[in-house]
Image (spheres, helix red, strand yellow):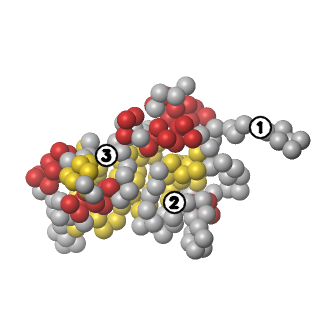
């Protein structure tokens, strides 16, 4: 183009431990801190894979591979996303069953694949829920917990597929090795 050779983008995927207070965007007209502010300079073509709202922390993928990004976020491919939610109160078995069978959120039925109560604190009047979802609609975990009467106090995504935050500091971002990129692509039927 205009005498310049066009080189295809290399398929790259970054894993980020997004802190609370950072928006999942590459730029912001209002000057808020973005995930791009936490990354190294060479971001050509990088886009977030899905979203974590400003108040949610944890595992976020960014990639130059549009096909991979689309499939990782589409419920059809069943990629597990695991969350740790600190909720108000102590959800009982009936509430857990509702999350597993499905609750209506914004006129759509959504459900968790698995829910486990990790801990309860009567003193703090809160519980820690571990939830696995195959989709990740906007504010889904927060809205699901609110629907069962146990609003979220804090939320962290801790896993996508086989990827975890193990060994990563908050705000840290690292390029995934090619073997992990290929494993992600295989997970969503891309070769």
Q: Which residue lies furthest to the right in this view?
A: 3
Which residue is painted at 46% across and 32% down in the image? 188
Left or right: 158 in relation to 62: left
Which residue is painted at 50% across and 35% down in the image? 184
Q: Earlier in the sequence, mark 2 or mark 1?
A: 1
Quadrant of the image occupied by residue 114: top left
Question: How far across and how far down the image is residue 101, in percent?
Answer: 17, 45
Mark 1 residue element? loop
Position above or below: 42 against 114: below
* Badge 3: residue crowd in 10 Å (few <14, some 14–19, many ≥20): many
Q: Which mark is residue 132?
A: 3
Mark 2 residue element? loop
Question: How far across and how far down the image is residue 68, in percent?
Answer: 53, 38
Residue 4 in view: yes
Q: Residue 7 carries which label?
A: 1
Q: Nearer the viewer, mark 2 or mark 3?
A: 2
Which quarter of the figure is the C terminus placed in?
A: top right
Q: Which of 12 and 127 is in front in this view?
A: 12
């Amino acid at each position: 183009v205009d005498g310049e050779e066009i080189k295809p983008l290399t398929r790259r995927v970054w894993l980020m431990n997004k802190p609370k207070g950072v928006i999942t965007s590459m730029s912001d007209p209002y000057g808020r801190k973005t995930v791009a502010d936490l990354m190294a300079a060479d971001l050509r073509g990088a886009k977030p894979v899905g979203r974590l709202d400003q108040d949610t922390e944890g595992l976020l993928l960014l990639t130059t591979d549009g096909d991979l990004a689309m499939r990782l976020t589409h419920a059809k491919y069943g990629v597990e996303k695991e969350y740790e939610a600190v909720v108000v109160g102590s959800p009982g078995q009936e509430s857990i069953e509702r999350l597993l069978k499905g609750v209506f959120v914004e006129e759509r039925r959504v459900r968790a694949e698995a829910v486990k109560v990790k801990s309860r604190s009567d003193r703090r009047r809160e519980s820690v829920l571990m939830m696995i979802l195959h989709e990740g609609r906007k504010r889904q975990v927060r809205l699901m917990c609110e629907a069962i009467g146990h609003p979220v106090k804090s939320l962290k995504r801790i896993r996508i597929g086989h990827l975890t935050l193990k060994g990563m500091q908050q705000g840290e971002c690292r390029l995934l090795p090619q073997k992990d990129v290929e494993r992600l692509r295989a997970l969503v039927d891309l070769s």
